[in-house]
């Protein structure tokens, strides 16, 4: 049975940063590509008139270099603005009036999680919730306990099938390809386990700092900001078993099974860091012990992965901006050729951003009289940044259609919190300072064991084959 298409798009936080950078460009893109033609109602406390809201939308598109005057004219015609405080009942009465005939609106909460409960109650009180969907942004809670509370709050008003928890990584083309590449090919499955894989590394490096979001970042830190959500989702796609079909239910069941097999983090297997200068950022406490870097070792207690370490490393002010996964296969025995030729031979590399790459690392013989080799990469996929449909367009479009395949459900989000929970209340003394432009504190090196090392995504050029 296909789901009903939402007949109005409401976004709370219409004057905020997320709306400016992501939501408004996504709305114009949905008009361009999908012929979006439903009322679009922004809610904010900005005091704006409708014309001022339209101007703001135009400014947002201009800042993104994405103005398409014809599509913008359509967007302008669909825009409405409801001005009001989220704590006041009249705001929701105004929204109800603005919704007019719409009976299946989608409410997107592009606002801090501390406001979710208030807005959800307000929607319910003004009869804007029945038949509606709600989309919430990450971070979904601050830890396992608060995520459970938040789920309970949402469930008081919305059934689980009407709740869409955004993790924009799941809307990325390259992340979807992890799932596709794994399960649309047969050659991986026989080697995708503890018998052949030595270790798995996921690095999310950003060369920039907190970019004026110090106040937000102080509330989260690297683990809550990107590990609990984006990177555990990537790990789940890499490690889970094959779902029986590509529907939301089957996918969620396998993800959940995998996440429940991940051992909660042991603080001795985590190194946290803070870049020098972070405390001088706007909105950051002078004594802040919030981590801007985390390196960690995860264990998966199931038959496929027992004994294979999964390493995750994420940080701000690192040497490059890229997200990359490397699945390292066990080394060939140093028997036929000498030891020097047998190291670092085989891996699968998925670069998730900025460009998408899927590559297989191998060694071939160097031309000449000697049996000497060199590393090469078989590039399976290589697409430039910008080739993909933008995650917010994809995700909001799916939510409007009621397709929750690309969203996380209550149980999965809680299982991911259960993994990181033991290190959230970390003792500030565990956070080590690192110099901007480096790969975090030196201690991060000890996270990788078994004679291996972190793969540097800016590594030596490997010849394509
Ligand atoms: C966000 C984090 O969820 O993801 C940011 O809050 C981070 O801190 C961003 O920079 C990275 O996303 P992308 O898609 O730009 O790689």
Image (cartoon, rainbow, N blue to C red):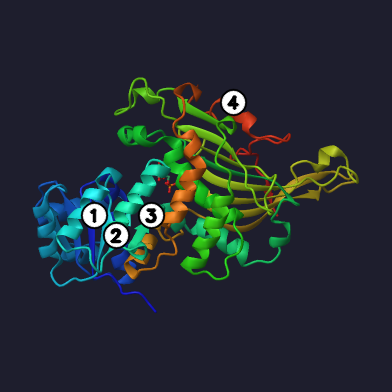
State the mark number for residue 120.
Answer: 1
- In the foreground, 70 or 25: 25
- In the foreground, 381 or 107: 107
CB of mark 2 near ligand 1 (< 8 Å) = no
Q: Are marks 2 and 1 in contact (CB under 8 Å)?
A: yes
Give the residue number, with chain letter if any, for mark 2. 134
Q: Earlier in the sequence, mark 2 or mark 3?
A: 2
Q: Earlier in the sequence, mark 2 or mark 1?
A: 1
- In the foreground, 58 or 283: 283
State the mark number for residue 443.
Answer: 4
Give the residue number, with chain letter if any, for mark 3. 166
Q: Position of residue 279 (x, y in %)?
A: 37, 23
* Circle nearer the viewer, 2 or 1: 1
Q: Position of residue 37 (x, y in %)?
A: 24, 71
Specify few, some or many for label 3: CA neighbours under 10 Å numbering under 14, 14-19, or 20 or more. Answer: many
Specify few, some or many for label 2: CA neighbours under 10 Å numbering under 14, 14-19, or 20 or more. Answer: many
Q: Could you tell me which secondary element the residue under label 2 belongs to?
A: strand
Specify few, some or many for label 4: CA neighbours under 10 Å numbering under 14, 14-19, or 20 or more. Answer: few
């Amino acid at each position: 049975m296909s789901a009903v298409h939402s007949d109005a798009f409401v976004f709370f936080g219409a004057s905020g940063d997320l709306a400016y950078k992501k939501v408004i460009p996504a709305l114009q893109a949905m008009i361009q590509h999908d012929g979006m033609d439903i009322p679009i109602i922004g809610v904010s406390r900005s005091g704006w008139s409708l014309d001022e809201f339209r101007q703001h939308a135009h400014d947002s598109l201009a800042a993104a270099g994405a103005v398409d005057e014809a599509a913008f004219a359509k967007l302008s015609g669909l825009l409405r603005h409801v001005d009001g405080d989220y704590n006041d009942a009249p705001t929701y009465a105004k929204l109800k009036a603005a919704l007019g005939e719409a009976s299946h609106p989608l409410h997107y909460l592009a606002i801090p999680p501390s406001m979710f409960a208030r807005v959800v109650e307000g929607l319910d009180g003004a009869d804007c919730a029945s038949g509606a969907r709600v989309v919430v942004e990450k971070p979904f809670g601050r830890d396992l306990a608060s995520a459970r509370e938040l789920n309970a709050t949402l469930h008081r008003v919305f059934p689980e099938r009407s709740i869409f928890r955004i993790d924009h990584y799941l809307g990325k083309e390259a992340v979807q390809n992890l799932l596709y590449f794994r399960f649309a090919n047969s050659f991986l499955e026989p080697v995708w386990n503890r018998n052949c894989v030595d270790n798995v590394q996921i690095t999310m490096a950003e060369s920039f700092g907190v970019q004026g979001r110090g106040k937000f970042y102080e509330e989260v830190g690297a683990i809550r900001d990107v590990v609990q959500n984006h990177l555990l989702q990537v790990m789940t796609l890499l490690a889970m078993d094959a779902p029986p079909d590509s529907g939301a239910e089957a996918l969620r069941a396998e993800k959940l099974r995998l996440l429940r097999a991940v051992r909660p983090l042991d603080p001795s297997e985590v190194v946290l860091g803070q870049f020098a200068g972070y405390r001088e950022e706007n909105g950051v406490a002078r004594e802040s012990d919030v981590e801007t870097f985390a390196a960690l070792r995860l264990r998966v207690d199931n038959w496929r992965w027992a004994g294979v370490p999964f390493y995750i490393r994420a940080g701000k002010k690192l040497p490059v901006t890229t997200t990359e996964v490397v699945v390292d296969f066990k080394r060939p025995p140093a028997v036929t050729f000498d030891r020097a030729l047998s190291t670092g031979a085989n891996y699968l590399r998925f670069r998730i951003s900025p460009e998408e790459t899927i590559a297989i690392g191998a060694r071939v013989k160097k031309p000449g009289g000697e049996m000497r080799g060199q590393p090469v990469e078989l590039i399976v996929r290589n697409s430039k940044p910008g080739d993909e449909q933008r995650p917010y367009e994809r995700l909001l479009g799916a939510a409007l259609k009621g397709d929750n395949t690309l969203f996380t459900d209550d149980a999965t989000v809680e299982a991911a919190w259960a993994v990181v929970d033991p290190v959230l209340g970390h003792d500030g003394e565990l956070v080590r300072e690192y110099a901007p432009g480096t790969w975090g504190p030196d201690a991060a090196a000890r996270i990788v064991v078994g004679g291996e090392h972190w793969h540097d995504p800016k590594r030596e050029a490997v010849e394509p084959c």
